[in-house]
Amino acid sequence: MLIGIIGLKFTGKTTLYNVITGAGLPTGQGGVDTHRAMGKVPDPRLDILTEMFNPKRQVNASVEWVDIPGFQPGAGADGGREATRFLEHGRKMDALAQVIRCFDGGYGTPDPMDELETMALELALADLQIVENRLEKLTKEKSKMGKVANPLEPPMMERFRAQLEQDRPLRDLELNPDENKIASGYSFLTLKPMIVVLNHEEDAVPPIDVAEAAGRAGAEVVSLSAGMEEELAELSEEEAGEFLADLGIEEPALNQMIQASYGALDLQSFFTVGPDECRAWAVIKGATAPVAAGVIHSDLQRGFIRAEVTAYDDLIAAGDMSAAKAANKVRLEGKGYLVQDGDILEIRFSV
């Protein structure tokens, strides 16, 4: 699962990417290459489980992030090439996180609403081009063959065109399973989950009008200061906690962004625990127990027999696993069980 960090030039994209992944890329230099790295997903439940089981190591769930080069609209041929590269990279992502500059960084006066609208327009026009090209091919197909291969596609594409011509993202539309299956083959940019990150000065108030506009377009909105998050990342856990406490903040805003992105991918976490390792695993919501077992190792899915399941809240209420078993809070589930967020699993298998 890939989350692409997108935006215009000089918005703080790479700074944010560095904080999430620890990649240490140089910032403010532009470039044409994408960069990919894993970023861990903070989860206080895993911290509590680690305290309970005292394992040799703790491993957070992780998601892969991609720093996609920014572009500058209206920059002539170079701007056109940058935008084309950006769009090509964006289509490969499972979700997009747009960073918007809300600070004065020496790159001219920031205009957050213009950045939001500019990006929305770029994405919509790119999708509209695909829709119009496809409708043209469907018209030729019907003229030649007397029909189209999939009669559901022409009306769906017409609906997409009407939506995009009104500058509305495709994610606002309700699609049935058949339409989703058709649409998935085109990698529409405005159909992807979107997170809008308002990157502002440490003490500044992010623009409310931009947040509201992004929310109306179906995006998750997160406000943070990438510069402050970068400073926090360089502190020890104790120092960072004291710094946040002085500001009256419970947790870094970066955590909220990562959790929002995790949710945008429709992911949830389950846990495995023991003396060697306490670990969080990412799995699609609605996944069955064998699918979750396969996230751990393919052999566990192939030879799946049963899953021993304990709900996180039940384990915490019981105090330890022995007490949870004594209270009948540990149960055996078969292949049809749908894993729930926070489940603690022990897989029984045979290969």
Image: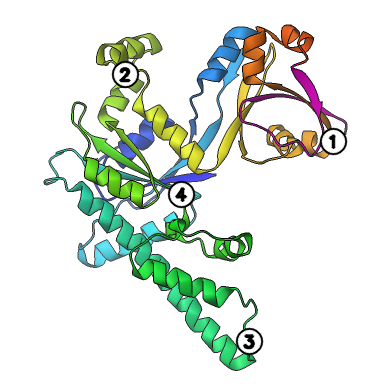
Q: Which residue is mark 1?
A: 303
- Mark 2 or mark 1: which is in front? 2
> Marks 4 and 2: CB-CB under 8 Å?
no
Q: Secondary structure at mark 1?
A: loop
Write down the residue under mark 4: 193
Report whether 311 appears left or right of 331.
left
Q: Nearer the viewer, residue 272 or 317?
A: 317
- Which segment did they paint magenta? 329-350
Tag 2 residue:
249
Closer to the eye: label 4 or 1: 4
Q: Is residue 45 above or below residue 40?
A: above
Q: Nearer the viewer, residue 168 or 34?
A: 168
Q: Is residue 118 left or right of residue 171?
A: left
* Whole-number angstrom distance, CA of label 2 to CA of label 1: 46 Å
Q: Quadrant of residue 128?
A: bottom left
Give whichever of discs 2 and 1 has the lower sequence position: 2
Distance in Å between CA atoms under marks 1 and 3 = 46 Å
The answer to whether residue 182 is above or below residue 303 is below
Say the numbered circle drawn on residue 147.
3
Marks 4 and 1, the one that precedes in the sequence: 4
Examine the structure image and report whether residue 336 is included in the region drawn in magenta.
yes
How far apart are the two marked residues, 4 and 1, measured between alpha carbons? 34 Å
Q: Secondary structure at mark 2?
A: loop
Question: Horizontal placement of 211 versus 258: left or right?
Answer: left
Q: Nearer the viewer, residue 213 or 203?
A: 213
Q: Give how far across and how far down residue 163 sits, in percent.
A: 40, 67
Q: How many marks?
A: 4
| 326 inside magenta stretch | no
